[in-house]
Image: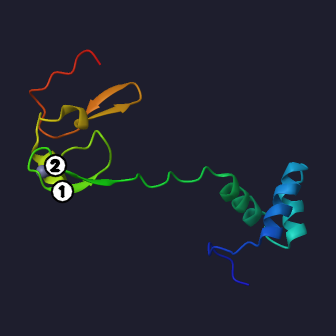
Amino acid sequence: MPGGPAPRIWCPDEDSLLHQMVAEGATWSEIGRALGLDRRMCKGRHTVLTAEPPDPPRPTRTRPCMRCGRSFQSEGAHNRLCDPCRDGAAGMAPLALIQHGHGGISIQDGGVSGLKVTDL
Ligand SMILES: [Zn+2]
């Protein structure tokens, strides 16, 4: 059996045994032996099982662009301009260009040089 990163199909029984043994404090070696697998595979599978599920895709809806009136897929209430207008809307929709990063506010590049961001 060739080693490698190829994903393996785990059956529910194996998953539950994996969970059970982890809960009982078994080592990865013991778990691997019980499952007949490499312990790294068991550890990797457990990581997958306990990982946060990815964010579901944002619901989008079609709405008319506030600038050109063309329908586009909006990502939410903050998203009122179609992509071409947003790209060209320097300073017109400053909130859409501001992202809250940790430690402060950064302005995305987009030609908002005249914009002053103060009390936020
Ligand atoms: Zn537009």
> In this figure, which residue is indicated by the disc labeled 1?
71
Instruction: From the viewer's side, name the closer residue of 71 and 105.
Output: 71
| First in sequence: mark 1 vs mark 2 | 2
Q: Does residue 39 lie above or below 22 as drawn?
A: below
The reply to whether callout 1 and callout 2 are in contact (CB within 8 Å) is yes
Q: Amino acid at mark 1?
A: Ser
Q: Amino acid at mark 2?
A: Cys
Rendered image quadrant of residue 47: bottom right
> In this figure, which residue is indicated by the disc labeled 2?
65
Q: Residue furthest top?
A: 119
Q: CA distance from mark 1 to mark 2?
A: 6 Å
Q: Residue at x 23, y 16 (%)?
A: 118
Question: Dividing the image into 4 quarters, which one contains the N terminus?
Answer: bottom right
Mark 1, residues whose alpha carbon is within 10 Å: few (<14), some, or many (≥20)? some
Does 58 sit left or right of 76 as displayed? right
Does 10 sit left or right of 91 as displayed? right
Residue 55: percent from left, percent from top: 50, 51
Does 5 sit left or right of 106 as displayed? right
Q: Residue at x 85, y 73 (%)?
A: 36
Residue 79: percent from left, percent from top: 26, 43
SS at badge 2: loop
Q: Does residue 11 lie above or below 106 as drawn?
A: below
Residue 49: percent from left, percent from top: 69, 57
Any atom of ligand 1 within 8 Å of the CB at mark 2? yes
Q: Residue at x 86, y 63 (%)?
A: 17
Q: Residue at x 69, y 77 (%)?
A: 3
Question: Dividing the image into 4 quarters, which one contains the C terminus?
Answer: top left
